[in-house]
Amino acid sequence: MDRLDKDTETAIPETQNQVAEQDSDQVKAANSQKMEEKRAENEEKDKTEAGLKVVIDTATLECLLCTIPKGIMKVNLDTPTIQEKKTATIKERGPKSLVFTGTCKKSPQMAAPCASVMNVRDWQDVGTYLSQDQFVLLQKSTIPCTYGGVNITITDSGQVHQPETIDAAGAPVPESKEKINGNFYNYNGTYEGSVKGQKKGNETDVYACEGKGAEEDIYKSPKKLNIVHSEFQKVCNIIKHEGLSTEKEEYLYIAHTNYNEAKRVGKTMFQLLNSSYSSVEAKDKVEMKTTEKDTISLHSRAGAIDALLRDVDDVKTDPTDNATQWDGEDFLAWGIDTDLKPDSKTKYGHNKFDEYDSVKISKSLYDSFVAKVTGRRGSTLAYTSVHDEGCDKGVHTHKTVKEKNKAVYALPNADFAKTDYWTTGDFYFKNATKQSFGLEATRVAGYTIFWKKIKV
Ligand SMILES: [Zn+2]
Ligand SMILES: [Zn+2]
């Protein structure tokens, strides 16, 4: 064979044997390639067939952002069984159906249980056949978790041996061709478009969607929100002005915190934000234009949509742990009871310390809040002030900037360093005057700290 390799062009007579040997090599090679192709084809077919298997209770799930990536499908809806197990449908969403026992790698310090942060949208690539009036899930179906920003997948349908595939089930559910009036926003906050002049829906309706469909005026998986467009736009704009950073969570938490307090007092998100609850100036309590597409506008819309979805989606959770109030850097600057507030000659410290029975902040949330605020502002913060050196109380100083009297406060205020407040390891302040609610910090995002009220 050496010879052939070296000089294949030269017509050297070959023996029958050599030819036969060469032929048989070629045949073998061709055969093995055919077998390889067949094997790949079968594998592809197996994969496709596996992908079409109807999913049942105890199917295996996978989330690559979970510290224990393997999860289990628990079917909660009462559906007909396959192999004596309930059929899974698109109704199985959220932590009660998608059971993961690990913590999410995307959460702070990877510490939050998957089940507490999971934030899913709708199942994709589902079967066309119905079980209890709901589309069935196929092994190839996926569901996006927006907390982690990944798809949760199904690695095993739960069926053993003889898989039951239903021919029609594998075809994707076709996109709806029905045009509905309304204003369509992507979950990420992008304005997608508005539909007018159709028979169905109001032109003031607001929908969350997965993006534009193939046809004009069609949007993917629209979900109607309980709000009219002009109020939605105002809610988004007020949230935008309440936030101070470029951090997405700050806007998300402001939206949900407002949602929580609105529910508590029986108002809509718009009514509450349009009241003194929000200190945003009246000139900014106006509609956010649909043309706005800067990052902060997108974060604000995405936050408002996420909160409003809680009205219409029962697996939607509150990412703030029941927060109903928030504060910014003033809280750290004005302190507890030593310094006069910049706008008063008689009031000491931040109002929260008068209004609540106690104030509790875990060490880690306090450290994170201080780090973020000082990272932005440095070690002091100056406010236009009604007091001056003449009438002063406390440890703040004064300076004149452009002929204006400014009070300069340390960040954090020295009050926070007093050891009496840290005897538990966390910050704990107890009001000498009894009040009906205590306050506990639940989240820090951007330059904002979020609070929940605890009934005393
Ligand atoms: Zn996860
Ligand atoms: Zn002063």
Image (cartoon, grey):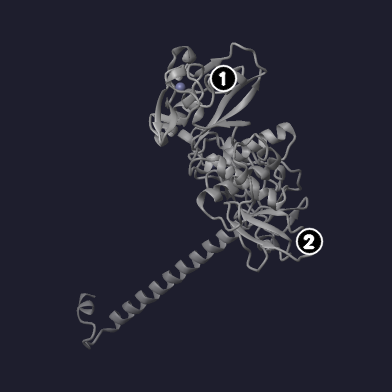
- Residue 393 to residue 447: above or below: above
Instruction: Report how far apart the C-alphas of labels 1 and 2 lie in the structure.
Output: 52 Å
Residue sitting nearer the eye, 201 or 72: 201
Q: Amino acid at mark 1?
A: Phe
- Residue 104 to residue 410: above or below: below
Q: Which residue is mark 2?
A: 200
Q: Residues within 10 Å of mark 1 (few under 14, many from 20)?
A: many
Please say if the residues under marks 1 and 2 sit with CB atoms less than 8 Å apart.
no
Q: Is mark 1 within 8 Å of ligand 2?
A: no
SS at mark 1?
helix
Sequence-wise first label, 1 or 2: 2
Mark number, residue 164: none
**With 452 as the anchor, is 36 left or right in this view?**
left
Q: Quadrant of residue 314?
A: top right
Check the picture and name the quadrant holding the N terminus: bottom left
Q: Residues within 10 Å of mark 2 (few under 14, many from 20)?
A: few
> Can you give x and y, in whole percent of width and height, for residue 408 in the image?
42, 27
> Can you give x and y, in whole percent of width and height, for residue 318 in the image?
63, 36
Single out the residue that lies furthest toward the right: 199
> Can you give x and y, in whole percent of width and height, for residue 448 in the image?
52, 34
Mark number, residue 353: 1
Q: Amino acid at mark 2?
A: Lys
Q: Is mark 2 within 8 Å of ligand 1?
A: no
Check the picture and name the quadrant holding the C terminus: top right
Residue occupying image coordinates x 50% and y 29% = 330
